[in-house]
Image (spheres, rainbow, N blue to C red):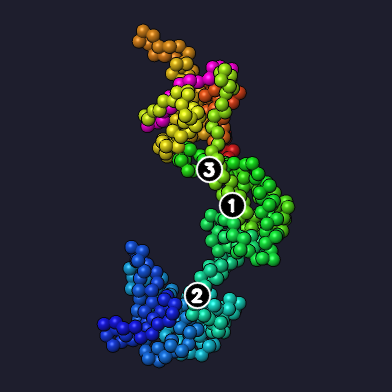
Amino acid sequence: MRDVVFTRSSGWIPNVISEDGELKLMLGAGADANHEPRTFTFPIEEAHLAVIREDLPRHLLLWSAVLPLCDAAGTAGRLDENAAVALLDPVLLSSPADVDALFRRIRWDRSRLVAHGADIGLLERGRVCAAMRSATETPNEKRAQEHHADRRRAERGAVLGPLDAAILRYTGQYAHGATVPRRIPGAADTALLPQVMRVIATAEQACAGMRIGIDPRRGKRATDKQGWGRVAAAVESAVRRAHPGLADDAVRTVSFLMCSETAARSRNTPEEDDVEAADDGADLGGSARKTALSFTDDKGAEKKWLRGGPRSASAEFWAFVGDRSASDNEVFTIEDEKKGEGIQLHFYADSVARITTVREGKGGSEPEYRVEYSLVDGLGEYRTLVNAFVHGGCSALEPHGPWTSDVAEFERARRRRREAR
């Protein structure tokens, strides 16, 4: 039978229970293989209970010292009860000097103490008992998270000034640099907020009018990496010129914010994939604009497009790519069967082939095709090529070369580009 003997208002601080007449400290820590919280217990004496009741700092110090033992137990291991019991007298009953000495020798959980109000400066100097004079029963998890982030920055030699810290707080990136940034004016130091906004204004001007579209080669919602890189480079360059004293962390978080917002705006205002030609058939290559096209992929899927439908040919093609593209499906073709020409996009190789029929197959003979290859630099060039073909066929692709039918020479060009990157 288990009865709770002593508990504090904060649910995570270890409780004292009586189990079959024996006093035990009970704490939750870690998780099992099913991600359910694990609970550990180990025996204590009446003298330990008396200190735990009356001395919050010592209670918290004991918790901090035992948590690494719980971590060592992992998802299914047993707590080393002997090691846990061996901590009781040194932490709860020893002099402050002896406790400080103990904490210099053992592993302990710093974040728990910081969350419960420990003086960080004293902790850093090894004076754990003195640091806990400011302890509170209610934790401040944000304080612990920010302290952990500060320690990570210190380990890599990053130093933040007041404005850097204000920018990171404004974007919600101070404690969690991997989260998507957002604008939180109330989180920044009020006195520094005008300076923060000047930095943000510089960044906004640098990327005004820029786009970060969707890259259908990687699915329906994948961000165009090249577009992201262009916005990031423009923002970082402008911010560093206008505000040379900012730390790298601050510059990067402003760049991240601008890229995230630009990508969101671009998703909400889709790019027009196909520049509409005049009704008289004028187009990019001087040929008649395509009226019927067939889209295929490397898995045998096919989709027909006819002029006059609700979407342009380019928009319909990229939607087809977004639906079908995968790591094992990276070759897509647009064919004008009536004209006997098409283009084939090789996403895995950053290349394209234009294919024209030289001679129709007659009397059982195979048709003859001319196949020419060219390298492609990113999604933007692929879009340009698709638009050019839709409006003018293979002849409209001529300015977007160079084109070669020499496969060996083309492979050499691919290798040279790969080696240069």
The image shows residue 269, relative to residue 135, as above or below, that is above
Above or below residue 232? Residue 162 is below
Judged from the image, the secondary structure of the residue bearing numbered disc 2 is loop
Q: What is the magenta range?
A: 286-299
Disc 3, SS: helix
* Residue lying at 43% horizontally and 27% vertically, measured from the top left: 295
| Residue 139: mark in rendering | 2
Left or right position of 79 against 190: left
Q: Quadrant of the N terminus?
A: bottom left
Q: Earlier in the sequence, mark 3 or mark 2?
A: 2
Query: Quick check: is 166 in the magenta stretch?
Result: no
Kind of residue indicated by mark 3: Arg
Q: What is the number of the mark on residue 284?
A: none
Q: Is residue 202 above or below residue 104?
A: above
Task: Give the foreground label among 1 and 2.
Answer: 2
Residue underneath mark 1: 256
Disc 2 residue type? Pro
In the rendered image, which quarter contains the C terminus? top right
Foreground label between 3 and 2: 3
Identify the residue at horizontal 38%, vertical 77% (top origin): 27
Q: CA distance from mark 1 to mark 3?
A: 17 Å
- Amino acid type of the residue tagged 1 in the rendering: Phe
Q: Which residue is mark 3?
A: 267
For marks 1 and 3, the one nearer the N-term is: 1
Binning the other alpha carbons within 10 Å of mark 2 as few (below 14), some (14 to 19) or many (20 upward) gives: some
Is the residue under label 2 in contact with that under label 3 (CB below 8 Å)? no
- Residue with the most extreme top position: 363
Please name whichever residue, 365 or 299, is drawn nearer the observer in this view of the structure: 299
When the figure is inspected, residue 213 is found, relative to residue 189, above or below; the finding is: above
